[in-house]
Amino acid sequence: MIRFVFATVLSVLSLATIVGPVAMPAWSQDNIRIVGSSTVFPFATAAAEEFGNTSPYKTPIVEATGTGGGLKLFCAGIGTNFPDVVNASRRINKTELDVCRANGVTDIVEVKIGFDGIVLAGAKSAPAMQLTLRDLYLALAARVPAPGSAGAPDDLVENPYRRWNEVNPALPDMEISVLGPPPTSGTRDAFNRIVIEGGCRNFAGMRALEQEDPYRFLALCRAVREDGAYVEAGENDNLIVQKIVGNDRAVGVFGYSFLSQNPDILQAYPISEDGVSFLNPTFDLIADGSYPISRSLFLYAKKAHIGVVPGIEEFIREFISERASGDFGYLLDRGLIPLSAEERIASLGLINSLVNLQLN
Amino acid sequence: MSDDRANNLDVLSRRVNWKSTQMRARVRRRYWADRLFRLSGFSAVVIAGLFLLFLLGNIIQNGISGFMQTSIEIDIAFDPTLLPDPTLPPDQFSAALARADMQRLLRQALMAEFPNVSGRRDIIQLTRMLSSGARAQLRQVILKDPSVIGTTKRVRILASDEVDQVMKGNIDVGVSEENRKLQDKELAWLGRFQQEDRVSLSFHSRFITGGDSREPELVGVRGAITGSALTLLVTLLTAFPVGLAAAIYLEEFAPRNRFTDIIEVNINNLAAVPSIVFGLLGLAFFLGFMGMARSAPLVGGLTLALLTLPTIIISARAAIAAVPGSIRDAARGLGASPMQVAFHHVVPLAMPGIMTGTIIGMARALGESAPLLMIGMVAFIVDVPGGVNDPATVLPVQIYLWADSPERAFIEKTSAAIMVLLFFLISMNGLAIWLRQRFERKW
């Protein structure tokens, strides 16, 4: 009996394997496909769900691949196997655009959707700090000017600082321990560009170097130390939040949306570019551009797919519509810092006329 | 050396005096060593158990409230001027209902409840106390019973995730106002509902029956469970026959030579390859070369089949090898062909072991997320998939995505989804044990 059952099961299974793939229907997916930045992911998914609920179109599929990974997929070609829209937490660069063009993706619409502030925060119970970009550079760069030097390129030494008060006596006597994203992340990209590089410019010697040899300047001024003071805590910002709440000696680096969701357990450290005015990462200060560590968020769409995959234009319009990114829009609840009303109207105009992206 | 031997012989030849102090000490030492070993073994079990208990305890403590959700009872006046005419034919009626402004219905109800709330900002805040799924809920109520139009009825409406977190005690309302998401006035509104006993925390069936969402109070695991089931179905249908056939051939028919040795080494090697490598293979072959659809369970299942194939082959070979040679000899002696020996005798007898290995391989596939990252199954997908070619995600990926979401309420949803995954894993491994005990033969 058992033998019979097993024999039957076996033959049915083998038959199914052979016939199965052949009998499958042809590939037909007409969802909009979105890939890209994990910073934009919480906003893109919220807009996608609302779009699916209120429009006749299917809910778009959103993948968090990171900005770089997303652009790579996006630029790989035209057709239903390639994504229609890519979210980016930085602007597309020349190299990526060249790859796009080489693969036939020539016409791209670029839409700015808002801003994101990068926050440095600690647990509520951690000592309060006010940080300048200079402090952060000295605490986190791989090589820093030797203490007391003018910061000429030859004065650079391996970062000797272990405690915050060694960097700046006004800071607490606490070990430097910063949890932040890995180099694959767009957040880290912006952090290196604004914080480390910005702090580097505080030194006359490095400023001179930037004029003389910008490549050498970048090489020296973008590297983050790898001796354990900066911990790469993965792309998961939530995990960083949970880790710093568990350890009040650690400082976390993450997107503003995570601060806005956890105001009862986190304290953000005020940041200053010039060492005079310290600014908290608040909604208004990031929106008007005065908080120093912020960047723009973008959305790119393939013109060749508009009209083929239904709803792409409408989806982008939903993203920057009044009810999504307006003053009381639902994306603001998720932590998006929206464009100003004028910029929003300008972006809507770009969508309506489908202006091609030009990099200069 | 010779002394030692002489001594040993001496010990053997003479009657041992067990009472001597020397012998007593030796016996004591042996008992001690024995007890110590047993104790260390036992404490290893205890430590492992404690870790497991801590993990499970933590997950259950966090996750159990994820199956519950807060609702608020609200008197809704189903205003006939905002809603379609209930005498319309059903399809027209539902189409008109989809266009009706439910948000306004809710807003009117809340403003009637709190007549002294005014100002656009405050009214928006008031409606934000309810879930954005409230509109769909109202639509359902009307669709079920169109006669409510024109009347006022008390409806249980899902509260927003923040209200829900306050009710569950996950947000500390004791801290000062600027440090929490819910402001004092919102808490006052909530307090009034509570006083009137209209706020309730109850079992939330949507968590089992719904698809994914960006709103923690609206999420469900059904999309992920269906995706996992479809993916595993494809995996089973591919990996089992291929794995079994490979095992039978290698064990029963293949000649022993260098070639089969190389194959054997490779299979064992493949079993230890990190799963992300299979994801890259899937990306290159199924998506790149075959041009299959991204995010589809078909591709996910085939990729995971590559991953489980070595496990199935290895366990199936072990099970086949464990069937005694006498069975084969007897069958051959009665004139069975080699294929008849394999399919009539050896494979049925080895089946319990093969099944156990397959189920354990499947359980591993159920828990995988890394290879699926590459083929686009790590995605936000709202609709529950209907077939192997629909975009889908799987349970471990769903857990990963929720763990990565900023909203506080997703912490409990993550743990609740882990509980669902553990339930399926325990069921599968339990089935494997049951099969083994039910059908296993001792020779």
Image (spheres, rainbow, N blue to C red):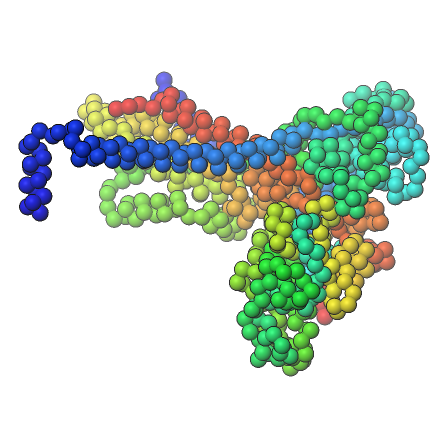
Q: Which residue lies furthest to the top in this view?
A: A1
Percent x, y for residue B191?
82, 31
Residue name at image x 86 percent, y 58 percent: A342
Q: Is residue B332 left or right of residue B243?
A: left
- Of B423 and A71, nearer the camera is B423
Residue A352: where, in percent of width, then height?
81, 55
Q: Can residue A170 be seen in this view?
A: yes
* Relative horizontal placement of residue A355, taking residue B380 as reference (left or right): right
Picture quadrant where residue B218 is located: top right
Which quarter of the rendered picture does the C terminus of chain B lie within?
A: top left
Task: Give how far across and how far down residue B62 sits, in percent.
Answer: 61, 35
Measured as percent of width and height from the top left, residue A276 is found at 77, 67
The image quarter in which residue B111 lies: top right
- Asked whether, in this view, residue B108 is left or right of residue A263, the answer is right
Q: In this view, does A70 lie above or below B385?
A: below
State the residue at coordinates (71%, 52%). Answer: A267
Between B251 and A130, the residue placed more toward the observer is A130
